[in-house]
Image (spheres, helix red, strand yellow):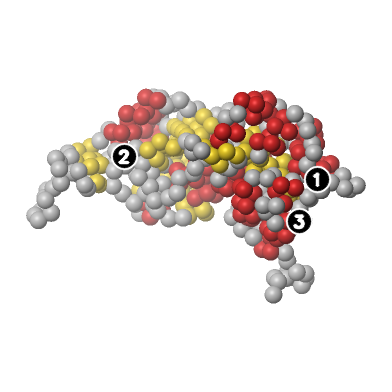
Amino acid sequence: MHERDKEGVIIHPSEEIFCEKSTKLRGKKIILGITGSIAASECFGLIRELIRHGAEVFPVMSDSAVSLAAPDSIEFASGHPPVTSLTGKTEHIALTGESDMLLIYPATANTVSKIACGIDDTPVTSVATVAIGSGIPVALAPAMHESMYRNPAVSENMRRLESMGITFIGPRTDGVRAKVASRAETVETVIRMLSGKKLSGKKILIIGGRSEESLDSMRVITNRSSGRMACALAVRAFEAGADTELWMGGCDTELPDFIPVRRFSSVSDLLKMTGEIDADAVLVPAALADFAPAKADGKIPSDGSITLKLDPVPKVLPVLCGKCGFVLGFKAESGLPEKELIEKARGRLRKYGLSAIVANDVSCAGKQDSEAVFITADSAERISGSKDGAAGYILERVAEML
């Protein structure tokens, strides 16, 4: 049986997942243009994901797309019957006038070139012509054989569209195909395009995860940090319009496929990378070692006891403060009252010359939710909730301070 709301009205299945993940796209109306690539089969999942973040999706399909993705399936996904032909209702004009952006996913070489030349002989290209002329944001996610993608005419048409302010999402090339962008990259780019872009034009570097100090050729000394906060911060910075990079140590979380990622293992490895920093702000939720053993040659035999001698490793935050004018540190303590936690964190802030510091209890390590305090030289504000929500708050404060 169908779900019903409080008044007994039947709820469409698309409404059941509305804002299931976030409200980042709540109130946004998105036209989804679907064209004749086999990647059209990915649209069902994309539509559902956009709805999970609060969007209302209005599908428009070319004739070629209809043969690859069933209109009934697309209607089930979105809750709206797809426009498959233009009628006296002037759907291409009416839809565009009521929507916040046009996303064409997938966009074939044929569609890309037609839009670049102002040709509108399908419902999708007609909507694109109106959208570009109306000035609403437009994004294209190309999908084609790589030989088509490398065709000089197609490349020139893409450059022409970029010069007109069109955003391209992907593609992912593998030497044979120019695959359509992943669902995650597409959704996050839509969020980025429709956000306030408070960090637009800023370069943000996130350093996260855990360091791993070698004991021998097999074993390492490390900690329980999952890297989730670093990923949440990187995604939120991307959504806010920043040019974002993520440096990640060991972690237990999936890394975003739409943000450049560099990996490090030890504190020594990370310190070697700091000479390449070019950022407006560096955020450091990484759990880095304070001590490390001298690495033994080969593998230490396991049939006896060993005595470890741990030596201090250099502190990374002071080095980062010498490379960037805005550094946000993180400080974890165990079992301290909040007042004492704030005092210790503020002492670290002053000692290293940090712009701000986030302090929390080590009990939060590896968990989905976060309890922390955002501390500056003269203020302390509590943060609680999901790590995504905490990351959003932190980035709001960073944007205000930059």
Q: Residue at x 43, y 55 (%)?
A: 367
Within-10-Å neighbours for mark 2: few <14, some 14–19, many 20+: some
What secondary structure is marked by label 1? Answer: helix
Q: Which of marks 2 and 1 is nearer the N terminus?
A: 1
Left or right of 270? Residue 179 is right
Percent across and percent down for residue 350 are: 39, 32
Residue 13 against residue 289 in the figure, above or below: below
Residue 219 against residue 112 in the figure, above or below: below
Of 323 and 354, the residue lying toward us: 323
- Which amino acid, mark 3? His
Residue 24 seen by the camera: no
Of 155 and 326, the residue lying toward us: 155
View extreme (bottom): residue: 1
Q: Do the residues labelled 3 and 1 touch (CB within 8 Å)?
A: no
Residue denoted by label 2: 265
Of 271 and 46, the residue lying toward us: 46
